[in-house]
Image (cartoon, rainbow, N blue to C red):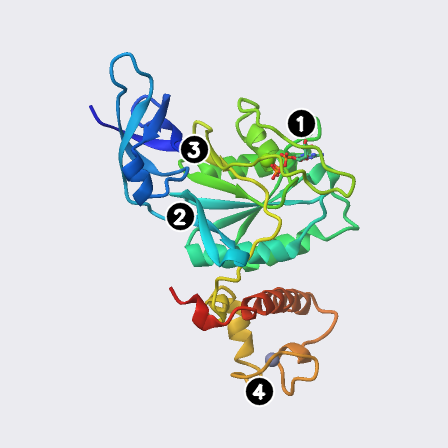
Amino acid sequence: MIIKARIFRSSKRHFDCQREDTKEIVETTALATLLKEEHLVVGDWVMISPPPQGGEEWKIESTLERKNSIFRNIPREQKKKVIASNIDVMLVVVSAGKPSYKRGLIDRYLVRSDYWNIPAYVIFNKMDLHDPTEFDINFECNRLKWLDAQSFEVSAEDTTYSPKYLSKGFKELKQELKGKTAILLGHSGVGKSKLITSLTDGKVELLSGELGKVGKGAHTTTWAELIDAENFTLIDSPGIRSMSLSDLTKEELLLGFSDINQWSAKCRFSSSCTHEENSKGCYFQNLDVGNRDTELILSRLDSYKKILEEVSNIPDWLKKP
Ligand SMILES: Nc1nc2c(ncn2[C@@H]2O[C@H](COP(=O)(O)OP(=O)(O)OP(=O)(O)O)[C@@H](O)[C@H]2O)c(=O)[nH]1
Ligand SMILES: [Mg+2]
Ligand SMILES: [Zn+2]
């Protein structure tokens, strides 16, 4: 008997897999020869065979081809570490309270989303703590709409705080997630683990960490793991300190900023313009000030320039596969 199953948790040679037929979680090990050839990650589909008589552990016989996979780029080692596979949507979680909102991180994830060809939803969590003088959420949501990314406003923590639009945020999100595998990504402490508790109506309690004195997360989650939320599958993942894009070439980066690419064509010296204050005939430097569209365009340029600097630190020829 050979059964199809999916890796929900992994540690070195041992894997908790969910059987596709009964949805039961079983313990498995993989043959050393298989592990030598393949780095198994959560989200992988595998074929497993039952334990020998008296035994408890199933055996992973083979793996099925991945639809896609996501990785963490480790610039120091110029390495990519695959962390999960077969993902339908990335949930980019940001905090609308503490830790403070980071727009740049969203733009980084949108580049990855484009590169991986996996859609991204942006989740504004901790709306119960949101102080409108800190940042204008309407501007941010419009900006995302304009970038073709859906956004949702929710609060994972306080169930007593449920103005209509917050529960609406959850309802819409759950609707959108139906039948999908979604990975939660974002800084430590933004509430990824807490959100999973809310999205499973409290059925799944994960370890959540208090924020430290400076309002940053404590890196509570240390491994990626899958969670069966009945109508959809969620992957909790550890918070990242920074989301490196240094593996991309300048060309690849520009592909992920198609808006910048189009605007740049309007600069007088479009092929060489660096869009600095003193750049002659630069489209960006000649926009009407005090206009909302200008603010949006310049916010994108700001993100682009920051990432371009990082990408330029390593010469492109070193990045060819
Ligand atoms: N007020 C409020 N607190 C929240 C909300 N969501 C999460 N928190 C709190 O924020 C802290 C961090 O939440 P976690 O779920 O551990 O954050 P995480 O993103 O999983 O963090 P790492 O696992 O470290 O990456 C916890 O103390 C949560 O109780 C929210 O919507 N509102
Ligand atoms: Mg966590
Ligand atoms: Zn320019």
Q: Position of residue 43 (x, y in %)?
A: 39, 38
**Residue 112 visible in the shown view:** yes
Rendered view: 290 above or below 26:
below
Q: Earlier in the sequence, mark 1 or mark 2?
A: 2
Give, as a three-letter code, the residue at label 2: Ser
Q: Earlier in the sequence, mark 3 or mark 1?
A: 3
Q: Earlier in the sequence, mark 4 or mark 2?
A: 2
Q: Which residue is mark 2?
A: 69
Q: Estimate the spatial distance between the alpha carbons at disc 1 and disc 2, rounded to whole Å.
A: 34 Å
Residue at the outermost top position: 54
Which numbered circle lies on residue 317?
none
Which numbered circle lies on residue 10?
3
Left or right, 124 with respect to 132, comes to: left
Q: Estimate the spatial distance between the alpha carbons at disc 3 and disc 1, rounded to whole Å.
A: 32 Å
- The front one of 251 and 280 is 251
Q: Position of residue 69 (x, y in %)?
A: 40, 48
Quadrant position of residue 313: bottom right
Q: Which residue is mark 4?
A: 268
Which numbered circle lies on residue 159?
1
- SS at mark 2? strand
- The front one of 231 and 17 is 17
Question: Of tags 3 and 1, which is closer to the observer?
Answer: 3
Give, as a three-letter code, the residue at label 1: Thr
Asked if the residue at tag 2 contacts the one at tag 1, i.e. Cβ–Cβ closer than 8 Å, the answer is no
Asked if the residue at tag 2 contacts the one at tag 4, i.e. Cβ–Cβ closer than 8 Å, the answer is no
Q: Estimate the spatial distance between the alpha carbons at disc 3 and disc 4, rounded to whole Å.
A: 54 Å
